[in-house]
Image (spheres, rainbow, N blue to C red):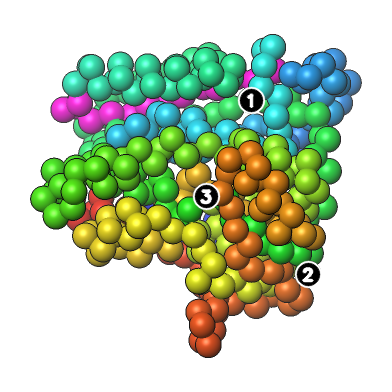
Amino acid sequence: MNYGKLSEDVYERSVVKVIKTNSTNNRKFYDGAGIGDFCAIFPYGDVDCKTADGTNAQSFAFVQATAGGKNAVARAYEAALNCAAAKGAFGDTNGSAYAGVTLFVPERLREIKVREMLAETAQRADELRIPVRNVTVQVLPWIGVETANCVIHMAHSGKAGMKGAAAGDDIVMTKWLGLEGTAVLARSSPDRLKARYPADIVQDAADFLKYISVIPEAACAVKSGASYMQAAREGGIYGGLWELAANNSVGLVADLGHIPVRQETIEVCEYFDLNPYTLMAGGSLLVTCKNGGALVQELARRGIFAAVIGKITEGKDRIIRHEDESRFLEPVRGDELYQYYKRRL
């Protein structure tokens, strides 16, 4: 199998089918996690619980994400929150949300690095008022790169009311492709990159983690009438587009020339011979809605860059266009970031 998350066909065959078929309780879940969607929402029933804004919680969100390498804990924490934000789950204060972290590290890693990773996450958790309630750290002999898994439990008001992507909807992409992957590469190999590029370009690339949260744009999109949201990450923007279409059983057409990319990402990917369109895209949110232009303008007023990159179509064909040429989008097999780690290890 390829590095990274399981391919769609293997996941459906060996995970979803097995879990849902063999568990009576799992068949009752009305909104479980899906392809590229790690946030599952379950009904509360008669349990009395409030969300952050004081409304009654109609459901409970359980979301998890994994990250490896430098800043693994903070990236896993942000990725989990992004998945929740894409589901419209915003219960983030007054004890209505909390996180748990498991960190696996190689024997060679120094204690100060563990402390730095957790301190970075604790600071962000304090800003968002979503505390990290428990942390498990294990040093394992077979771990080559530090790896973190973050699980977030969150009360969910169920107010988002997204109906799902439908033919005719615009596809809006926030920020730029490959942000998370670019930052990881720049932080992992700064000296190699500085040997070719100016130090300020490498530093700017490393600072892309400041863009990794999609919570602000998700909140704006919900208020603007989004029909569906997909937090892009593993498999890059191509992976995010495929997951969006697969989860809604729709087709799409995306224009390659309209997908925003930063020059820093192009330079870093060129150096490591990686495809930026399948590079880890944490920090970008894909939104479907009736008037993508209006959403882009609203996001711009809030200081968030976005662009309309395509449309949802009838049928299930997923097409990428570039000038006068068109080709079918295919499921992404792994992520370019894992190719980097494979070569390095």
- In front: mark 2 or mark 3? 3
For image coordinates 76% across by 34% down, the residue present is: 42
Q: Is residue 30 left or right of residue 67?
A: right
Tell me, yes or no, if residue 168 can be seen here: yes
Relative vertical location of residue 42 with respect to residue 301 in this rendering, above or below: above
**Secondary structure under the numbered disc 3 in the rendered image:** loop
Q: Nearer the viewer, residue 302 or 239?
A: 302
Q: Where is residue 280 in the image (x, y as percent from the top left)?
A: 42, 51
Residue matched to label 2: 168
Residue matched to label 3: 175
Q: What stretch is highlighted in magenta?
A: 96-109
Q: Pick whichever of labels 2 and 1 is earlier in the sequence.
A: 1
Under mark 3, the amino acid is Lys
Q: In this view, does 13 lie to the left or right of 60?
A: left
Relative vertical location of residue 167 with respect to residue 323 in this rendering, above or below: above
Q: Which of 307 and 247 is in front in this view?
A: 307
Measure the alpha-carbon separation of dots 2 and 3. 23 Å
Q: Pick whichever of labels 1 and 3 is earlier in the sequence.
A: 1
Is 104 magenta? The answer is yes
Checking the image for residue 153, the label placed there is 1
Checking the image for residue 341, the label placed there is none
Under mark 1, the amino acid is His
- For label 1, the crowd category at 10 Å Cα-Cα, with few meaning under 14, some 14 to 19 and many 20 or more, is many
**Secondary structure under the numbered disc 2 in the rendered image:** loop
- Is the magenta region chiefly helix, strand or loop? strand
Is 286 magenta? The answer is no
**Secondary structure under the numbered disc 1 in the rendered image:** strand
